[in-house]
Amino acid sequence: MNRPDILELKKKAIEIRKDILKMLMIAGSGHTGGSLSAVDILVALYYYKLKLDPAKPSWKERDRFLLSKGHGCPALYAVLADKGYFPKEKLWTLRKFGSQLQGHPQIGLAGVEISSGSLGQGLSIANGIALAGRLDKLDSRVYCLMGDGETNEGQVWEAVMTAAHYKLDSVCAIIDFNGLQIDGFCCEVMDMGPYLHKWKDFGWNAIETDGHDIEKMILSLDEAEKAKGKPTVIVAHTIKGKGVSFIENKVEWHGIAPKKEEYEKAIEELDGELSKLTK
Ligand SMILES: Cc1ncc(C[n+]2csc(CCOP(=O)(O)OP(=O)(O)O)c2C)c(N)n1
């Protein structure tokens, strides 16, 4: 695929952040910090890497993206709407009774590959999809986005072993490594030690990058695709709440939505960033 215009992708990421904040503000609840931290990773995937056709969400040859950290779904919904999977107006129904856009993703909404929300399950599903793809001789790749806190889950490490054992090189795990989880810093809640080494020792190709540098994310995704005979993890260093100064790196912004005044202040900041890029 041709190299995309990075400046355009940076602008896209800001627009996605604005949509996320609007959705959350209207809903009055939801996960702000972990949605904002994942935006640049999703932009690199959806506007560069993933082989998809929004007009044919069930196309057999497509790449699969699994949002294992389901609580970050406002970011996924905003990207899917922008890609044309469903009308943008649906975004403003987030968390409303009867809406397809629930607080955690559910299959049935175009572009959503798995229901998620109970953390720790996505990588096991990715393995199953990759094994099935091997049987069907498909050339699709499977990307699974997890939170660093999520990888405290034992099931993740069962899946890590499984992917290495079956040499699932079509699997790419991406860790939104923002250092925070629901109730504190990950290193205080459950210190995971030398993180990259853990994956390597389990037989994975492991890459570390800046998860807010879209260009570096793109290069890492390309590098991951080249690795043969083993799965790849991209540990993407991020900031929880990225893009809004008073939300960044604040544990209290894990599971709350901005109020109207906070929303307006946040939009002002993001518009300021956007105008710097447009100059
Ligand atoms: C099995 C399970 N246990 C607990 C929770 C509650 N929970 C929701 S988000 C979260 C923290 C996740 O932290 P992390 O994966 O680092 O997400 P991020 O900081 O990127 O939002 C927890 C414990 C859950 N959703 N599923």
Image (spheres, rainbow, N blue to C red):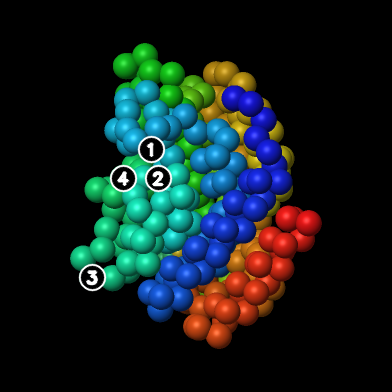
Camera-side mark, 3 or 2: 2
Q: Name the residue under label 4.
A: 110
Secondary structure type for disc 2 = loop
Quadrant (top left/top right/bottom left/bottom right) for the C terminus:
bottom right
Label 3 sits on a secondary structure element that is loop
- Tell me the residue at 43%/68% (across/down): 23
Q: Does mark 4's beta carbon lie closer than 8 Å to ligand 1?
A: no
Q: Provide residue 119's location: percent of width, then percent of height.
A: 40, 55
Q: Furthest residue to the bottom?
A: 261
As drawn, is 228 to the left or to the right of 245?
Answer: left
Which of marks 4 and 1 precedes in the sequence?
Answer: 1
Q: Are marks 2 and 1 in contact (CB under 8 Å)?
A: yes
Question: How far apart are labels 2 and 4 at the CA level?
Answer: 10 Å
Depicted 99 relative to depicted 204: above or below: below
Q: Which amino acid does label 3 sit on?
A: Phe
Say above or below: 108 vs 229.
Answer: below
Residue position for label 2: 84
Q: How far apart are marks 2 and 1 (CA)?
A: 6 Å
Q: Distance between the residues labelled 1 and 4?
A: 8 Å
Q: What residue type is labelled 2?
A: Gly
| Sequence-earlier tag: 1 or 3 | 1
Q: Which mark is residue 54?
A: 1
Q: Residues within 10 Å of mark 3 (few under 14, many from 20)?
A: few
Give above or below for 194 relative to 97: above
Q: Which amino acid does label 1 sit on?
A: Pro
Amino acid type of the residue that numbered disc 4 sits on in the rendered structure: Ala
Name the mark nearer the viewer: 1 or 3: 1
